[in-house]
Image: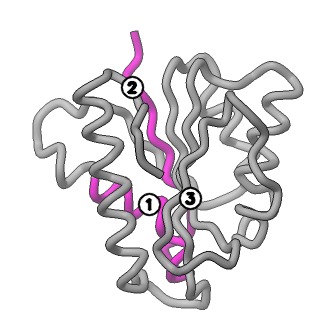
Amino acid sequence: MTRPLVIGVGNRLRRDDGAGPAVLDVLHRLAGQGTQPFETIELAGDCARLIDLWDGRAVVSVVDATRSGRPAGAITRFDALDRPLPRDTFLHTSHVFGVTEAVETARLVDRLPGRLTVWGIEGRDFGQGEGLTPQVTRAAARVGEAILIARATTGGDRTDGG
């Protein structure tokens, strides 16, 4: 059986757009040097690749920055198998084909993983440069902790928070 997959979507050189990769950093730091309870992939480019990355997987989490008008650092969690993702949540990232388009395309062609949780972290600054705003840094830590705790306690990615 394959380990759960966590995909961090985003560009580290576009400030808060690097929220997804920052969560992967948190996961690696918290899990330590031993055997990781998950596999991680950083995706900085076209999200159409998501469909191939999660193909045949039982448990997948995707983390990306959002720009929906909520306060910076706000965390949103979607069980993508239950209902379509809101089109206006992941719309304004630097990706041409975003997370929402990948999920909904995969749904149409029956290529979703067994369980798919999509985490959004609301960004504020998507300009050029490295480093997250403080609110997004704190949110990335909370999402990383939530994914790790859920994996340790349930073997998956179910949490009560969002």
Taking 19 as reference, is 152 left or right?
Answer: left
Q: Which percent across, then down, holds residue 92?
A: 75, 72
As drawn, which residue projects farthest toward the front? 160
Residue 41 marker: none
Whether 19 is among the magenta residues is yes
Residue 156 marker: 2
Taking 64 as reference, is 108 left or right?
Answer: right
The image quarter in which residue 125 lies: bottom right
Find disc 3 in the rendering and name its residue.
Answer: 120
Q: Neighbour class for label 3 at 10 Å: few (<14), some, many (≥20)?
A: many
What separation in Å lies between label 1 and label 2 (alpha carbons)? 20 Å
| Circle count | 3
Dots 1 and 2: beta carbons under 8 Å? no
Taking 50 as reference, is 121 left or right?
Answer: left
Q: Does label 1 or label 2 sit earlier along the sequence?
A: 1
Q: Neighbour class for label 2 at 10 Å: few (<14), some, many (≥20)?
A: many
Q: Which percent across, then down, holds residue 137?
A: 35, 74
Taking 85 as reference, is 116 left or right?
Answer: left
Q: Does label 3 or label 1 sit earlier along the sequence?
A: 1
Which element is circle 2 on? loop
Whether 106 is among the magenta residues is no
Does 82 sit above or below residue 101?
above
Does 81 sit above or below residue 93?
above
- Please tell me which residue is depicted at 63% across the width and 67% down the height of the picture: 66
As drawn, which residue projects farthest toward the top? 1
Find disc 1 in the rendering and name its residue.
Answer: 21
What separation in Å lies between label 2 and label 3 (alpha carbons)? 18 Å
Which element is circle 1 on? helix
The span picked out in magenta is 1-26
